Amino acid sequence: MSDSNSTDFTNPTTFILLGIPGLEAAHVWISIPFCTMYAITILGNFTILFIIKTELSLHEPMYYFLCMLAVTDLVLSTSILPKMLSIFWFYSREINFSACLTQMYFIHCFSVIESGILVAMAFDRYVAICDPLRHSTTLTNPVVAKIGLAMVLRGIMLILPHPFLARRWPYCRTNIIPNTYCEHIAVVKLACADISVSSYYSLSVAFFVTVLDVLFIAVSYTQILRAIFRLPTKDARLKTFGTCGSHLCVILAFYIPHLFAALTQQFGYNVPLHLHVLMANVYLLVPPVINPIIYGAKTQQIRVRLLQLFTHQET
């Protein structure tokens, strides 16, 4: 009998997501800001997509990349929030093992894709400011499509080993995940086996993606700033810097929470578990909320079109 139970539990059919450990009594209240964030994410990103699709003047590389970013944000937030809200509202904590691995894959895959899109947007700004005469010939529609496809394939291929490795481990300790979603390391830590392959691969991917992407963005903006400071007048410098200000804000909104969460995970040994979980949710869910707000507020073409939509003015 015990052997049968052990065998069944070695390959669990479900995991249990606890939500935010220690704050179970406040789950309903915590769900309010998260639900609001999801509503803003859906409304904001679909609005950005609609405006860019209907406004012919926005059919440019920067806005094509912005569309990719909006779609990525929608998929990323939808991979997390519906299940989280079902935990908070209906105590629906069970998640099928395959569904857990699928959620894990989508979350990590689209995080990598989003980082890649930010790199592509930095390249677009670099060409537009440092070599404006060649911008239209360098970033043609086929080139933009190829860059977008490359960023998607990079995310798909780099994260593909995660669920395959996680599926092969035996799970005989517990099936309880102290989180609101199936985060990779949180899942494989439940295995009763040597998971060093998963751990090292996960760290390698995180290091490869983050360091290379941040380095490329930093080099691009170093060249951009040098080009801006060489402009003859202050007005020209401010106007040119304004064209990439929204992208800089989005970059900071994406990488700073990631950095803070990573530091908390590595060195915050005395930080309560519920703060770790909250930070793990915030660093994934905040960028999809504020990205459309930043672009809506800082990009004149989008702002004007948005005002026209609300005031029912003709273009």
Image (tube, grey):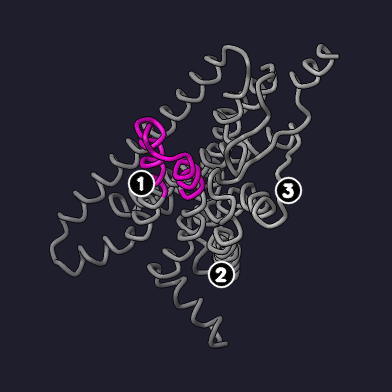
- Which residue is the site of mark 2? 51
What main secondary structure does the magenta stretch of the protein show?
A: helix
Q: Residue at x 44, y 72 (%)?
A: 301
Q: Quadrant of residue 178?
A: top right
User: Magenta segment: does it hold 262?
Assistant: yes
Q: Which mark is residue 256?
A: 1
Lower position in the chain sequence, tag 2 or tag 1:
2
Name the amino acid, label 3. Answer: Ser
- Local packing at callout 3 (Cα closer than 10 Å; few below 14, some 14-19, many 20+) is some
Question: Could you say which is closer to the camera, residue 199 or residue 15?
Answer: 15
SS for dot 3:
loop
- Local packing at callout 1 (Cα closer than 10 Å; few below 14, some 14-19, many 20+) is few
Residue 255 at x, y percent in the picture: 38, 44
The quarter of the rendered structure image containing the N terminus is top right
Distance in Å between CA atoms under marks 2 and 1 = 28 Å
Magenta-colored span: 254-282
Distance in Å between CA atoms under marks 3 and 2 = 37 Å
- Which residue is the site of mark 3? 92
Residue 117 at x, y percent in the picture: 48, 45
